[in-house]
Structures are given as C-alpha cells and as structure tokens.
Amino acid sequence: MGPQSSGKSTLLNHLFGTNFREMDAYKGRSQTTKGIWMGRCVGIEPCTLVMDLEGTDGRERGEDDTTFEKQSALFALAVSDIVLINMWCHDIGREQAANKPLLKTVFQVMMRLFSPRKTTLLFVIRDKTRTPLENLEPVLREDIQKIWDSVPKPQAHEETPLSEFFNVEVVALSSYEEKEEQFTEQVASLRQRFFHSIAPGGLAGDRRGVVPASGFSFSAQHMWEVIKENRDLDLPAHKVMVATVRCDEISNEKYDSFMKNEEWCQLKEAVQSHPVGGFGKKLSSILNTCLSEYDAEATFFDEGVRSSKRKQLEEKLLQLIQPAYQSMLGRIRSDTLQRFKEAFDKELKGGIGFAMAARECTGTCMSQFDEECADAVIDQAKWDSSRVRDKLKRDIDAHIAEARTAKLAEVTTLFETKLNDALAGPVEGLLDGAGDDTWPAMRKLLQRETDTALTGFSTALSGFEMDEQTKDSMVLGLKDYARGVVEAKTKEEAGRVLIRMKDSYDSDSMPRIWTGKENIRAITKTARSASLKLMSVMAAIRLEDERDSIENTLTVALGDGKPTKKGTESLDPLASSTWNEVSASKTLITPIQCKSLWKQFNTETEYTEASKRNNNWLPPPWAVAALLILGFNEFMTLLRNPLYLGVIFVAFLLVKALWVQLDISGEFRNGALPGFLSLATKFIPTVTNLLRRLAEAGQRKTNAAPQHNLTPASKGNDIDDDKMM
C-alpha cells in the first residue's frame, strides 16, 4: 500500500516476478491500479500470494471519497502476514504524505474488529537520499509509535504495546529511474528475505491466527464483508450525507403519493376485468408527473446522490405497476384469442378453404394484438411483450391444429360412411348370387366406388393446403378402408357359408314349398352343385385379377359327393391347410374347412331327402279301395256293438295325446331312422307322465266334492289356513 503513482506495482513486479500493470511515465502521472489485484509470487517458497492495492491520495477519487482507501488498507492489514508500505524518502516526517491519518484510522478499527495476529509492517523507503538509513529509521519508528499511542483503544488493549499487534521493519531502495542497477541489486537482496518468510526468524516468523490455505478464500471474503459493514470507515462529505438523507425522504414521499393516486387506483382496478384504452399513455403521464415532482424538490442536492435515488424511485414505481401491465397484456391476449376463434369458425362455415381461413384470421388478429400492445406501452419502461405475443401465437396454432384434426376426421368419416353404404349392400348381393362373375363384378364395383370417393376426398383436402406426402397418405388410407369394407363383408358372409348352403330356394330365389311332387334327386344334385360354386367363391378374397384353381380343386375332390377313401389321404387335394395359389391373409375358408363343411352339408342333405320322401303319408288309391272292401265285415260289427265305438274313441284320444306330446311329425322331419330312435327313447316317459296327470286330475275331482257341505266356520278356518300357507 502507499500513495498513488509511487511505484508500488513496479516494485512488486521486480520483487516477486508478478505482472501487475505499471504506469507509463511518458503519458503522465495518473491512476494505474484500480481496486485490489492479486497474483502469485514466482520462484518463492512456500507458495506466497501478493496483493497490489489502489494508491491513496489520488485525484481521481478526490477528497470526498476516501472510504475505499481506508477499507482496502484495513483489508490488507487484516488478511496479510506482511504489509509493504511504499513511501518517498522526502515524505518522512510529513502528515498526509506519510499516510498518518490513514494508518491512525486503520489501527483504531483493526483493534476493534479483529483479534491480534502479529502483522509485519515493512516500510519501503523509495529514492533514498544521502541521508543514512540509520537516521531515517528512528524518525519513522517514532511517528508510528505516536500514531499507536494516539489511537483510542478498547479497554482490553489499553496497555497493549505496538509490538503485540505489529512487527515494524524498515528498508530503503535507490531510485528506479536514476540508479536502476542499484535498485535491481537491492530488490534482489530484499527478495531473499521472502524465501521461507514464515520460518522462525523470518519476516513473518512469529505470526499468529494462521488460516489454512483451503480456508483463505472464505476468510478473506468474511473479512471484507465485516469491513464493508463497519460504518466508522464510511465517512462521506457532509453535503453527500445530507443529500442522501433528504433524497431518501423525497423519494419515499413521492412513492406513497403515487400509490394513493386516484387515477392509478382506477386503472389498476379496471384492468383486472377488461382491457383499458390508452393504458400506456395514462400510466406514463402519472409516472412522469411523479418523477418531475421529485426532480423539482431534489434539484439543489448532490447530483450523484440525486440521480441514484431518482433511479431507485423509478425502479420501485415500475415494479409496482408491472403486475397491472401484465394483467393488461393478459386481457388483450385472451380477448384476441376469443376473437380469432369466432372469426375462424365464421370463415369455415362460409365455405372458405381451411388453410386460407386460418392464415387470414391469424394475420388479422395478430395485427390487432400488436396495435393494442403498442397502446399499452409505458414510456419509462423497456418491457418486452414478445413472450405474451408468442403465447398468443402458440394458442392460435394449437386451436388451428385441433380444428384441423377435427375437420379432417369429419371429412374422412363422411367419405368412409359413403363408401360403406355404397359397398356393403352390393357386396352382400353379389355373394348371394355366387357365380363365375362374382369377383370380377366385385372388383369393378370397388374400383368404381373408390374412384368416385377419392375424387371427392381429394377435392375436400385441397382446402387444407397440406403437403403431398400427407395428402397421399390420407388418400391411401381411404382407399385401404374401401378395400377393408369389402374384405370385412366377405369374411362376414364366409362365416355363414354353411347356412347359405342349406338354404333351399327355387329358380325364382323364393323359399321352396314342398308339395310332394318335386324331383328330390334333381333338386339335391342342383343344390350340391350350387354349394360347390358358393364354397369356391367364398374360399378366398380375389380383389386382384389373378387366376386360381380353387373351383377345379373342389370339383375334383368333392364333385361326386363321396368322402375320401381310407389309404388315399396322400392323394386328397384338400389335405393341405391352405390354397397353393392364395396367400394366408386372403384365405377365408381353408381346404380342410371346405372338406368339413361339405361333409356336414351332405349329411343334412341326405336326412332332408329321406324326410321329404317320407312326408307322403297317404296310401295309393288301390290300397284305399282294398281297405274298404276287405274291412266291410269289421265295419258292420262296429255298428252292431256301439261299445266298440267308445273304446275306439278313447283309444283315438290317447293316440292323439301321444301324437301331440311326442311331436311325431317333427321327429320324422330329419328322416325315418333318426325319428324312430328319438321316439324309442321318449315313448315310455311320455306315457308314464300322461297317466300320472290323469290320476292327479281324478284325485282333485274327488276331493272337491265334499267341500260343498262345509259350514261357514269351517270355510273360515280353511281360509285362514290358506293364508297361513
């Protein structure tokens, strides 16, 4: 430490090998080092750190700003083991030039703030003259002792000697400019004293309160905070102190006045519910009035203090009104978004293209938002509304994306419904009349309806102005949907193929009414042929025009209606689980399933054929005539004995009851053999049940007769018993 431009940085650079900035003498004498700089000594062990302090008594800070000089000097004394005090030889014995007031203040504060730690004060006398050092050193030590004696001390250190706090050393150096070689030799000699300076007998050999290197940073920071908070070092000029206090009072008065301003209160309340026209101009005017009143009252105080306090007042006022400004922007954003939604929906209902409507409405609403934001700008603030604008743009884009998704889904659903209506019914009709032209007709139908739908769909999508890849993807999706409708309907009908094979229709496609005169064999043969055709059509999906041999395979394997003989399974064309010419994804009925379906169909056809042949219960006419001639005697016997007629009548009733109970006509519907087998199992249980019912009916009739002779009391008891039951 030392006076400004006294060669401190030059001395440190030569002494410790540092590279602190030095003053350029050719440019004049001025402040070079500002603040506190730190460096590591080069080639000195153990590791030593050196600090270069800003010079004292500089014209740049002036007489009214000595706080930092005192703070930096106290910091150097508090944190360092060795303090080099640089002073000119001819300043010894002077008051200000020898830094006596500064040392006095620092000594006083240091004793109060920090415990004794034995700092070495090394006074470096620069540009020594002919006066021997032996004559200069006593004068310097005497001055230091006088400073120490005059400093007010705490009670604990009233009798503490200077040597308890400081170890004073003095060294003299020749002029650097006039005797550079001697200066260099003397500095080199002094440098040797810093090697192992903390060893016993060294410059700082008796130091106390040592802080480990790992804790140096924290220790130094804490010391600086203590020094900054110590008010004894903050000694500004009287006018600065008065300006500080008075400007603070004026600033607080204007802030309170602004908070109570009626116009501001109305603006703050109104902006919570709706946007306020001219918000920025009104608020800027109120702010300008408040700041102008401050300027008028504080104009005669120190300019630096006045400007600083004005800036603080402006920042506080802007911080106060910022929530209202943000609320204003929020209202503008929400109202603009609502206007966009209404305008956008109106444009879409008017038939304009989706993309064009979105573009026009977005541009209009964003322009309105920018205009309203410009109206809300406060002149004194530099606030940016871009974040609110970006949020509005994101909200608009999100609404457009949502509406676009919904609109595309609506258009897609509309054309899918049209395709489903146009394909499902005709496909079912084509499969009903299964024939050689079924699949060609189905392909033609699919192509026609798909082309029609895709034309309309592409026109509808043009209004969205989407890229070709997305458009092609959606068109392909609709095309796949149409194909899926046909495939789904075909799979549904394939699941009912056995029912269709068993349905019996005449040549007019009407349900057949059996009269007994039909050619059952011919009808059966035709039905089997039609069933083979139906299975061949239903066996696989043939939406591509590719030939296959499914029908020929079925005709060869099943055409004669006979099952495959044992020992020939290897030659069976239907032994495979798939058709060779058709992929598994297009197969609806596998060869094995066709074989099973054909077997079921043949079994039921045989039963039906036998049933229809047995449905003619009337005997031939010649048999009727023979019965009448041969039964004449029996007929006369019945006439002569009416009792036989009664027996026959009762027998008729019993047979009739058995006929109804056993449902004989229904049992023989599936053929004679199944009918006889079913009746054989049901006959005895039905007869037993019928006899039991007759016995129970007779018993109830016998019990009911005596009840007509019961007394009223007994009837009442019976009623009570019934209730209890």
Image (cartoon, rainbow, N blue to C red):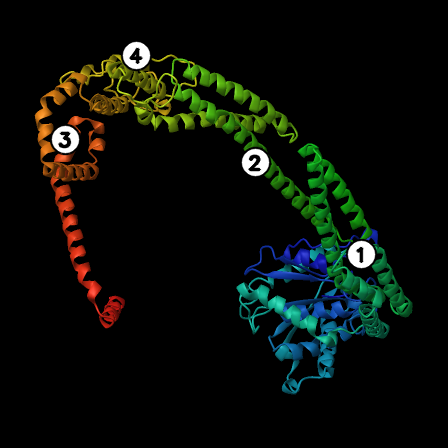
- Give the structural element (helix, strand or loop) at label 2: helix
The image quarter containing residue 713 is: bottom left
Pointers 1 and 2 in contact (C-beta within 8 Å): no
Using the image as rendered, state which of residue 207 and residue 175 is in the foreground: 207
Residue 157's x, y, as percent? 64, 84
**Of the residues tagged 1 and 2, which is closer to the observer?**
2
For image coordinates 73% across by 39% down, the residue present is 361
Instruction: Measure how far apart labels 1 and 3 are at the Cα level.
Output: 99 Å
SS class of the residue under badge 1? loop
User: Crowding at label 3, few (<14), some or many (≥20) Cα neighbours within 10 Å?
Assistant: few
The mark closer to the camera, 3 or 4, is 3
Q: CA distance from mark 2 to mark 4?
A: 46 Å
From the image, state whether disc 1 or disc 3 is nearer to you. 3
- On the image, numbered disc 2 is attached to which residue? 409
Q: Residue at x 9, y 35 (%)?
A: 641
Q: Amino acid at mark 3?
A: Phe
Residue under label 4 = 552
Q: Are marks 4 and 1 in contact (CB under 8 Å)?
A: no
